[in-house]
Amino acid sequence: MTFDDFSELVKANRSCRRFDNNHKLNPSTLKDLVDLARQTPSAANMQPLKYMICTDDVKNEAIFSCLGWAAYLTDWPGPVKEERPTGYIVILGDTRVAKRFWCDHGIAAQTMLLGARTKGLAGCIFGAINMKMLKDVLDIEGHFEIKLVLAVGKPVETARMEEIEPDGDIRYYRDAEEIHHVPKRKLSDIIIRSW
């Protein structure tokens, strides 16, 4: 893979919030993604992350109800049933292994979503989670700390990156054609010093 190929993969990996609910995922697909995460770097090589995967329709609905879907789209409560993801990966930190998880879960989540894109899938990383509710729904034991939830499925939305306008508004939005626009800062605005 060339740098340009990888760059295109990263650009294609936008947060997806609308999926084809008729495209059912096989648990082995999610296991493949977790296997990618298993091979990523881990602080002090502690490897404290554990995962729950779900492709069950009933359980997926319960997980869906625990997630905050798009803070900037204030008039949108989340995808309708026909556009909900058909898989979830819950990333947990096992406090029996480590007390701090550093950035392990971020590395794992991004790696899994990049892997999903190579399979023609897309996903969204959730940190806006009703933790108590999700612990109850999934019967998560007390020594596990919920770190993130990934929604995964076949995408039905188009997302476009664009440079932030002069007004500096970073909020993503949807236009009349339902295209999801994601403003990004310019490279020259984020490199503050170069030697």
Image (cartoon, grey):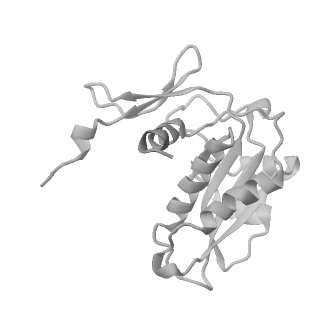
Report the number of discs. 0
- Work out whether residue 42 or residue 22 is closer to the camera in this orientation and state it: 42
- Work out whether residue 39 or residue 178 is closer to the camera in this orientation and state it: 39
- 64 left or right of 108? right
Position of residue 70 relative to residue 62, above or below, is above
Q: Which residue is depicted at the point 53% across and 36% down? A: 12
Judged from this view, the residue extending furthest toward the top is: 176
| Image location of residue 99, percent across then percent down | 52, 82
Position of residue 172 relative to residue 108, above or below, is above
Residue 12 visible here: yes
| Image location of residue 13, percent across then percent down | 54, 40
Judged from this view, the residue extending furthest toward the front is: 1
- Please identify the quadrant where the C terminus is shown: bottom left
- 56 left or right of 92? right
Position of residue 30 relative to residue 157, above or below, is below
Q: Which residue is depicted at the point 15% across and 52% down? A: 194
- 176 left or right of 151? left
Judged from this view, the residue extending furthest toward the bottom is: 96
Answer with the quarter of the image where residue 48 lies.
bottom right
Residue 146 visible here: no
| Image location of residue 56, percent across then percent down | 86, 51
Answer with the quarter of the image where residue 51 lies.
bottom right
- 159 left or right of 21? left
| Image location of residue 151, percent across then percent down | 67, 47
Answer with the quarter of the image where residue 96 lies.
bottom right
Q: Which residue is depicted at the point 51% across and 61% down? A: 107
